[in-house]
């Protein structure tokens, strides 16, 4: 490979961690007394999650709006408990990231609201331990992936150029957005293919 990669930037949900939306939905369904379908509609169907991920509303505004849609009060603890239940570590990918971190910089860019990064040690302790302060939510940058400036503002904060960054995400649209912003990209399909890609790029 001709390009020298100094930073590997990971997505979190369904890459570094397995993401079980149903566990999150089931918890909020129990808290609110609403059906799982009503909870899914409130979070994703209403566009509320997208607005929070883009940083258009604060965490408190998100919780208030979610409670209003569901017809009940949703506390921060209610939300965090449900979100934590949805996350489990992808041990193989975390091991690859740990090996990478011995020779290269690593960071996380996830489409999420600030409630996630502000509480990352509770929600995802394995990611928090490995990546430290370098776990960034799209909400911090005023837009969600695949908007080009989401990647570029993240890299500005890290002091790394797009040309020396490899971005890994399970969604092709997000990888395409990264490539359009000048980063290198890899669509994640599993730990084995990621390991092959990292070895091909001589990063491991």
Image (cartoon, rainbow, N blue to C red):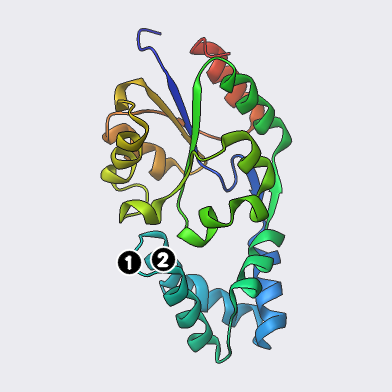
Q: Which residue is mark 2?
A: 52
Rendered location of residue 80, percent (x, y) = 63, 66
Q: Position of residue 77 (x, y in %)?
A: 65, 72
Q: Secondary structure at mark 2?
A: helix
Q: Quadrant of residue 167?
A: top left
Q: In the drawing, what numbered circle is on residue 46?
A: none
Pointers 2 and 1 in contact (C-beta within 8 Å): yes
Q: Is residue 91 visible?
A: yes
Please state, as top left, top right, bottom left or bottom right, where the N terminus lies in the image.
top left
Where is the C terminus found, in terms of image quarters?
Answer: top right
Quarter of the image holding residue 50?
A: bottom left
Residue 9 vs residue 125: left or right?
A: left
Residue 189 visible, this angle? no
Badge 2, how many Cα within 10 Å: few under 14, some, many 20+? Answer: many
Depth check: give the residue in front, 157 or 106: 157
Residue that mark 1 sits on: 56
Determine whether the residue tagged by mark 1 lies in a helix, strand or loop: loop
Cα separation, mark 2 vs mark 1, equals 6 Å
- x then y, percent, for residue 111: 45, 52
In-front residue for pair 195/75? 75
Q: Nearer the viewer, residue 86 or 186?
A: 86
Residue at 37%, 48% in the rendered image: 145
Residue at horizontal 27 percent and vertical 35 percent from the top: 180
């Amino acid at each position: 490979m001709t390009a020298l990669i100094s930073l590997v930037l990971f997505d979190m949900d369904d890459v570094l961690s397995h993401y079980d939306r149903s566990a999150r939905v089931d918890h909020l369904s129990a808290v609110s007394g609403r059906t799982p379908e009503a909870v899914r509609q409130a979070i994703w169907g209403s566009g509320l999650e997208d607005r929070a991920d883009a940083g258009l509303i604060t965490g408190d505004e998100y919780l208030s709006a979610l409670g209003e849609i569901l017809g009940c009060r949703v506390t921060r603890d209610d939300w965090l408990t449900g979100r934590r239940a949805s996350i489990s570590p992808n041990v193989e990918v975390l091991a690859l990231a740990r090996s990478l971190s011995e020779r290269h910089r690593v960071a996380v860019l996830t489409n999420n609201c600030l409630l996630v990064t502000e509480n990352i040690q509770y929600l995802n302790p394995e990611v928090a331990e490995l990546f430290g302060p370098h776990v960034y939510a799209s909400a911090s940058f005023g837009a969600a992936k695949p908007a080009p400036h989401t990647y570029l503002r993240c890299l500005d904060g890290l002091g790394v150029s797009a040309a020396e960054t490899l971005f890994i995400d399970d969604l092709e649209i997000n990888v395409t957005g990264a490539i359009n912003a000048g980063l290198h990209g890899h669509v994640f399909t599993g730990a084995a293919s990621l390991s092959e890609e990292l070895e091909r790029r001589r990063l491991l």
